Image: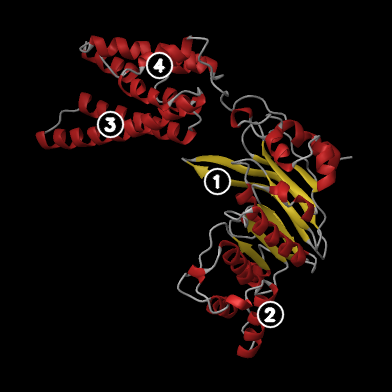
């Protein structure tokens, strides 16, 4: 009977000595059976300890948490087996008790995270977390078997033509301009390889100002970090004939990167801030006089001369943004990358900022910009890059080309409508990402 109790405890987290808990556990797994079925997972996984914890995390869109929950289940089984089959001294028993208690507390934390994921997937109010944590068999049965409760999406084992398609083509590497041939950008989460970006190839001409579009999680910032060498990918990035990854130390100041949040010291003046930037970014061959001249020139370009003695903390939002860009412009880079430079600015100030960027591009520079309000300044851009998540939620290239051709390609007049068309339905979009990823690949192949 003790062996049966042990086996039941592994399968249902309760044995014959706790009939009420055993009944609740049985009803809970009946509910999970239905949730698996609705999520596109074979229901028989409910009979496999450890795997069922992982699969529930997948249903909740919390794969990482599912991995941890499965690992914690393994540890619980191991310690339970040790306590069941091996005689323990009083000290050993106390040690085992503390370890098991700690594991149970950590398990509760991850159970909460998975439950919150299920609440999100089933588009329910967060108050559902209360029954999930105390009488979990009730919401499990309701969501698993009542038709009114349906998940917004299924587990990403669904077939996706775009996810399995690769163009096999590369952008030409030229002596001028920017060439990006990105095969993949991956990371590892709980011993599992996760694809962030795949199959992105493009050539950007000098003097072009390019808009980077994509919904949340499409990989815009990851893409920019791969281009500027901050987070290297399996890629070839060539700027004006030189390989960025192979010559990163020599070329790091040939790329200006302006993040959304600046790192300037509020207690420094504008002049001091730019002087320090010049000392860091200009070649050591520059004399003090040459550095000072460069600082004065940059302040004139960005309209900062009248406030050069003002503290950074006293600048307006627009002035502070211009100073952030000026710091990067000190080294006269060939490529400018800006992540939401108009964040927090009103329409007038934002347009003035983008007009300044347009003037920089007209000097033969390449500028790539992320902005969440593109339509108010779209006339200032030459091209647009559209990244979208394929069926496996990997960032892919859905379009790259001129603004006018983008409107024709997507059948949309506004850039914000283009983003909506490639966003998933559960994100308020049209869910057409795969369609446009494949369509763009076909256009590229002629």
Q: Are marks 2 and 3 in contact (CB under 8 Å)?
A: no
On the question of residue 13 being in view, the answer is yes
Disc 2 designates what residue?
Answer: 297
Q: Earlier in the sequence, mark 1 or mark 3?
A: 3
Front label number (1 vs 2): 2
Residue 417 in the image, given as x and y percentages of width and height: 72, 37
Q: Residue at x 51, y 25 (%)?
A: 121
Task: Pick whichever, 354 or 19, lies toward us.
Answer: 354
Q: Residues within 10 Å of mark 4 (few under 14, many from 20)?
A: many
Q: Earlier in the sequence, mark 2 or mark 4?
A: 4
Mark 2–mark 4 distance (CA, rounded to whole Å) = 66 Å
Mark 2–mark 3 distance (CA, rounded to whole Å) = 63 Å
Q: Which mark is residue 139?
A: 4
**Disc 2, SS:** helix
Mark 1–mark 3 distance (CA, rounded to whole Å) = 29 Å
On the question of residue 42 being in view, the answer is no
Mark 4–mark 1 distance (CA, rounded to whole Å) = 34 Å
Q: Residues within 10 Å of mark 2 (few under 14, many from 20)?
A: some
As drawn, the residue found furthest toward the right would be 446
Q: Earlier in the sequence, mark 3 or mark 4?
A: 3
Task: Pick whichever, 346 or 137, lies toward us.
Answer: 346
Residue 95 in the image, given as x and y percentages of width and height: 17, 37
Q: Earlier in the sequence, mark 4 or mark 1?
A: 4
Task: Pick whichever, 279 or 430, lies toward us.
Answer: 430
Front label number (3 vs 4): 4
Side of 22 where 406 appears, left or right: right
Q: Are marks 1 and 2 in contact (CB under 8 Å)?
A: no
Q: Earlier in the sequence, mark 2 or mark 3?
A: 3
């Amino acid at each position: 009977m003790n062996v049966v109790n042990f086996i039941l405890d592994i399968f249902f987290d309760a044995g014959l000595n706790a009939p009420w808990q055993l009944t609740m556990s049985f009803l809970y797994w009946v509910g999970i059976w239905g949730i698996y079925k609705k999520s596109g997972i074979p229901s028989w996984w409910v009979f496999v300890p450890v795997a069922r914890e992982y699969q529930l995390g997948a249903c909740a869109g919390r794969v990482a948490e599912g991995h941890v929950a499965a690992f914690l289940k393994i540890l619980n089984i191991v310690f339970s087996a040790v306590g069941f089959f091996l005689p323990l001294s009083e000290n050993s028993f106390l040690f085992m008790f503390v370890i098991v208690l700690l594991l149970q507390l950590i398990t509760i934390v991850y159970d909460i995270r998975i439950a919150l994921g299920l609440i999100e997937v089933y588009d329910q109010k967060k108050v559902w977390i209360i029954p999930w944590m105390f009488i979990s068999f009730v919401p499990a049965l309701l969501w698993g078997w009542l038709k009114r409760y349906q998940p917004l999406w299924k587990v990403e084992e669904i077939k996706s033509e775009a996810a399995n398609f690769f163009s096999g083509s590369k952008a030409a590497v030229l002596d001028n301009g920017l060439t990006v041939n990105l095969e993949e950008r991956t990371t590892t989460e709980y011993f599992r390889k996760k694809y962030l970006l795949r199959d992105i190839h493009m050539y950007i001409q000098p003097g072009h100002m390019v808009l980077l579009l994509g919904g949340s999680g499409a990989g815009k910032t990851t893409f920019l970090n791969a281009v500027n060498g901050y987070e290297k990918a399996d890629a070839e990035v060539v700027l004006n004939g030189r390989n960025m990854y192979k010559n990163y130390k020599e070329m790091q100041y040939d790329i200006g990167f302006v993040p959304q949040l600046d790192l300037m010291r509020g207690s420094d003046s504008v002049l001091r801030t730019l002087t320090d930037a010049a000392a860091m970014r200009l070649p050591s061959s520059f004399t003090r006089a040459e550095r000072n001249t460069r600082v004065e020139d940059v302040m004139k370009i960005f309209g900062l001369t009248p406030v050069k003695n003002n503290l950074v903390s006293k600048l307006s939002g627009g002035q502070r943004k211009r100073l952030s860009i000026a710091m990067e412009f000190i080294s006269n880079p060939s490529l400018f990358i800006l992540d939401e430079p108009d964040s927090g600015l009103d329409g007038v100030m934002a347009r003035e900022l983008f007009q300044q960027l347009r003037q920089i591009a007209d000097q033969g520079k390449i500028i790539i910009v992320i902005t969440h309000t593109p339509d108010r300044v779209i006339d200032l851009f030459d091209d647009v890059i559209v990244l979208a998540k394929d069926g496996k939620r990997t960032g892919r290239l859905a379009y790259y080309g001129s603004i006018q051709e983008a409107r024709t390609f997507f059948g949309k007049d506004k850039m914000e409508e283009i983003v909506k068309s490639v966003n998933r339905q559960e994100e308020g979009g049209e869910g057409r990402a795969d369609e446009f990823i494949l369509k763009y690949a076909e256009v590229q192949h002629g």
